[in-house]
Amino acid sequence: MVVPAVVSAQLEIGLDGGFTYSDVDGATDATIGFSVPTSGARVAFAAGEQLLIETRLGLDWQKEGDASGSLLSLLPGVNFLVNEQVYVRGEAGLSRFSFDDGVNPSASGTQYIFGAAVGMRRALGTGALLRLEAGVDKALENTGDGIPSSLDMHATIGVSAVIN
């Protein structure tokens, strides 16, 4: 398959923003979120003409009064380029969180995540890509840390810098 150089980049670094819908087991209501950019970045390396090894890294930190919380997510995955614009992605990784309300003992835990998505990559000039993606991620229950499972659906738009 012959694809334009910007689409078959050797290195791609990007940020995304968009909507998420999260349904946590046991929660009364689902959560709908919007973020620009998302709380993370992605880096992809070419692994052949039709494969990209992509890792998403997320870091959230919040503080309000004496309470603070952090979340670190690492989601390695593979993007299969169906053609020069369409890709299918699969990923599996983990999230690590900690929370301290300033009164009770602090809590922390790990949650395993796997997911899939379909997306489009389109060249924006010679050194950038526009990415549109829709997907779903499943976070598994961790009974030892008291973390319920969840199902997250997302629709994102992103921009990537490419290095050949």
Image (cartoon, rainbow, N blue to C red):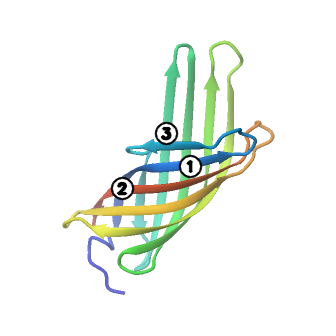
Q: What residue appears at the point 58 percent right and 59 percent down from the top-left corner?
A: 136
User: Where is mark 2, residue-wise?
Assistant: 158
User: Where is mark 3, residue-wise?
Assistant: 59
Left-right relation of 118 to 102: left
Task: Provide residue 78's location: percent of width, then percent of height.
Answer: 52, 67
Left-right relation of 75 to 35: right
Q: CA distance from mark 2 to mark 1?
A: 18 Å
User: Where is mark 1, residue-wise?
Assistant: 21
Name the outermost residue toward the right.
143
Q: Secondary structure at mark 1?
A: strand
Q: Nearer the viewer, mark 2 or mark 1?
A: 1
Task: Tell me the quarter of the image containing the C terminus.
Answer: bottom left
Q: Nearer the viewer, residue 54 or 15?
A: 15
The image shows residue 115, relative to residue 110, as above or below, that is: below
Q: CA distance from mark 2 to mark 3?
A: 17 Å
Q: Identity of the amino acid at label 3? A: Leu
Q: Secondary structure at mark 3?
A: strand
Closer to the chain start, of discs 2 and 3, is: 3
Closer to the chain start, of discs 1 and 3, is: 1
